[in-house]
């Protein structure tokens, strides 16, 4: 205990200060920034608990629903789970530092945590309630458990199987958060097949029982998909990349994915990511197991996502697990502290930029540029009041939007779950009977620049614009809302497909 305190107070003082500032910044970011469109969308899920959902597995929505029940509808309530999972992530990194660097545990832990929070994607995605904050924590914990078991088994085939079953349990729960956990399952399978000392596991029942345990955790997802013609599986495995009009090789999405990955995880981190594949000395048995699991994950995810990016939109943050698994080795991979310092400075700049961007005003707009993704979060309290006023004026009418993100934002703003998404393309709202209205019904419809106005208007006999509202602040126009009255819903079948 005294040694740890001495380390903290001594040569690691600067690292402690860096981590402390990032932690304060993380709290400020979490409680002050405006709810993102997808967060509001997930809030709607949490208000309508189900076995699973069209876009993602259910765990994130379940937790949002739970915190909303206890803390009401506000930013803090929605993001409470991120504080818990981030604390869990820090604990796993501490365990890893202790295993990998027993002679410099505190320093290695501080370097890992500082680098984690200086990564724009890892900082932001563990501060907002996207599914990734759960995926990162649970998958990191599962990988630790698997490496612990594999290192023990390699030395003694009669080693306790508790870490194996713990890893399988955590992996199953991770898959309840996001389907990307499947890449860890594939990683573990490849590793067991490939490692000569682990291959004998295939002749024993435990690895198969662990697999069954993992799958049992996915029972709600499997039941939901069976009930809904495997809609969620089809979305992620087929429809997302099935645009017949797209070119065989999409240069724009391919380049955008590579640049986004490089920039948004932190440009400096590409150096240790590459260094992972060179010989690493002084690793104990646990470290050798963990590093190979990390290497397989890196190759598997980035090769697949790079290929898929040439066919359609692939998000850079899908590779978060690869970076999270690399970071425990950073103390031996990035020895030049000036490079580490650059990563920290760039991280601080991003945190300041992101906090201002999503709480005060879009910085690009203040500088004369545009950022539609940022602008879309502004002006919702005002738009909500206008919606309620127009609903009273033109009622009784249904209230709807021209797209699922907007429906989520309006629902969260008004704290109600009877908002319809009338974009013909499938979304969560397709499975809760809020995609179509009774034939001949009228609706008040809110539209923003992300909505499908043409597809929505075609579903009514008459479609009239009744009001426009531009949200302005700090002398600039930020977000534009349009309100339409749709009369005589045609109840036509949904024919458009998700692009």
Image (cartoon, rainbow, N blue to C red):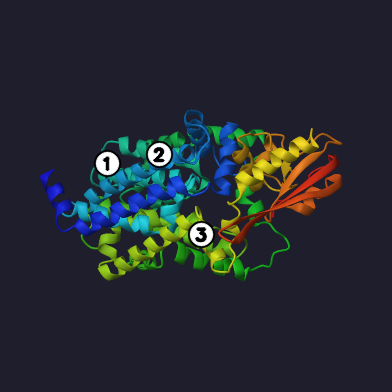
User: Which is more foreground, mark 1 or mark 2?
Assistant: 2
Label drawn at residue 157: 1
Q: Nearer the viewer, residue 59 or 343?
A: 343
Q: Name the residue tied to disc 2.
A: 170
> Quadrant location of the N terminus?
top left
Give residue 494's position: percent from left, percent from top. 78, 44
Residue 126 lies, with reference to residue 160, above or below; the image says below
Give residue 84's position: percent from left, percent from top. 38, 39
The alpha-carbon separation of the residues under discs 3 and 1 comes to 39 Å
Q: Residue at x 48, y 61 (%)?
A: 302
Give residue 497's position: percent from left, percent from top. 73, 51
Q: Nearer the viewer, residue 452 or 306?
A: 452
Q: Nearer the viewer, residue 175 or 40?
A: 40
Q: Which badge, 1 or 2, comes first in the chain's sequence?
A: 1
The alpha-carbon separation of the residues under discs 1 and 2 comes to 23 Å
Label drawn at residue 316: 3
Give residue 19's position: percent from left, percent from top. 29, 54
Q: Helix or strand or loop: what does disc 2 sit on?
A: helix
Residue 280 in view in this figure = no
Q: Residue at x 83, y 36 (%)?
A: 441
User: Which is more foreground, mark 3 or mark 1?
Assistant: 3
For the image, the number of numbered tags is: 3
The local crowd at label 2, few if under 14, some if 14 to 19, many if 20 or more residues have their Cα within 10 Å, is many
The furthest residue to the left: 2
């Amino acid at each position: 205990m005294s040694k740890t305190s001495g380390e903290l107070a001594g040569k690691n003082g600067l690292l402690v200060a860096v981590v402390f500032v990032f932690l304060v910044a993380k709290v400020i970011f979490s409680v002050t920034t405006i709810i993102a469109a997808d967060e509001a969308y997930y809030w709607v899920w949490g208000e309508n608990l189900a076995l699973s959902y069209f876009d993602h597995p259910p765990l994130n929505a379940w937790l949002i629903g739970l915190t909303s029940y206890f803390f009401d509808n506000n930013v803090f309530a929605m993001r409470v789970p991120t504080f818990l999972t981030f604390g869990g992530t820090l604990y796993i990194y501490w365990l890893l530092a202790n295993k990998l660097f027993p002679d410099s545990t505190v320093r290695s832990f501080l370097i890992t945590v500082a680098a984690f929070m200086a990564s724009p994607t890892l900082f932001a995605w563990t501060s907002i309630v996207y599914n990734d904050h759960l995926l990162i924590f649970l998958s990191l914990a599962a990988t630790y458990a698997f490496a612990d078991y594999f290192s023990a088994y390699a030395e003694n085939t009669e080693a306790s199987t508790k870490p194996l079953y713990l890893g399988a349990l955590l992996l199953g729960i991770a898959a309840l958060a996001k389907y990307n956990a499947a890449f860890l399952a594939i990683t573990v399978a490849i590793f067991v097949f490939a490692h000569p000392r682990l291959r004998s596991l295939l002749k024993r029942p435990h690895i198969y029982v662990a697999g069954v345990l993992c799958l049992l955790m996915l029972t709600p997802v499997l039941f939901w998909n069976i009930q809904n013609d495997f809609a969620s599986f089809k979305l992620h495995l087929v429809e997302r990349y099935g645009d017949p009009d797209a070119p065989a090789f999409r240069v724009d999405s391919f380049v955008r994915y590579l640049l986004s990955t490089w920039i948004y995880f932190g440009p400096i981190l590409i150096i240790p990511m590459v260094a992972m594949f060179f010989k690493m000395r002084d690793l104990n048995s646990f470290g050798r197991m963990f590093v190979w699991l990390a290497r397989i994950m890196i190759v598997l995810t980035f090769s697949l996502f790079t290929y898929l990016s040439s066919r359609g939109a692939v998000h850079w943050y899908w590779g978060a697990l690869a970076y999270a698994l690399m970071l425990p080795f950073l103390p031996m991979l990035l020895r030049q502290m000036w490079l580490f310092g650059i990563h920290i400075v760039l991280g601080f700049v991003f945190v300041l930029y992101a906090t201002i961007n999503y709480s005060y005003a879009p910085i690009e707009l203040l500088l004369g540029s545009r950022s539609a993704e940022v602008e879309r979060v502004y002006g919702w309290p005002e738009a909500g009041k206008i919606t309620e006023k127009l609903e009273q004026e033109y009622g009784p009418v249904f209230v709807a939007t021209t797209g699922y993100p907007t429906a989520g934002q309006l629902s969260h703003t008004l704290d109600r779950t009877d908002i319809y998404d009338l974009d013909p393309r499938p979304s969560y709202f397709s499975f809760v009977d809020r995609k179509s209205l009774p034939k001949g019904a009228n609706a008040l419809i809110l539209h923003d620049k992300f909505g499908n106005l043409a597809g929505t208007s075609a579903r009514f006999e008459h479609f009239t614009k009744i009001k426009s509202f531009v949200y302005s602040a700090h002398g600039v126009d930020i977000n534009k809302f349009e309100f339409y009255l749709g009369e005589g819903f045609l109840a036509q079948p949904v024919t458009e497909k998700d692009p």
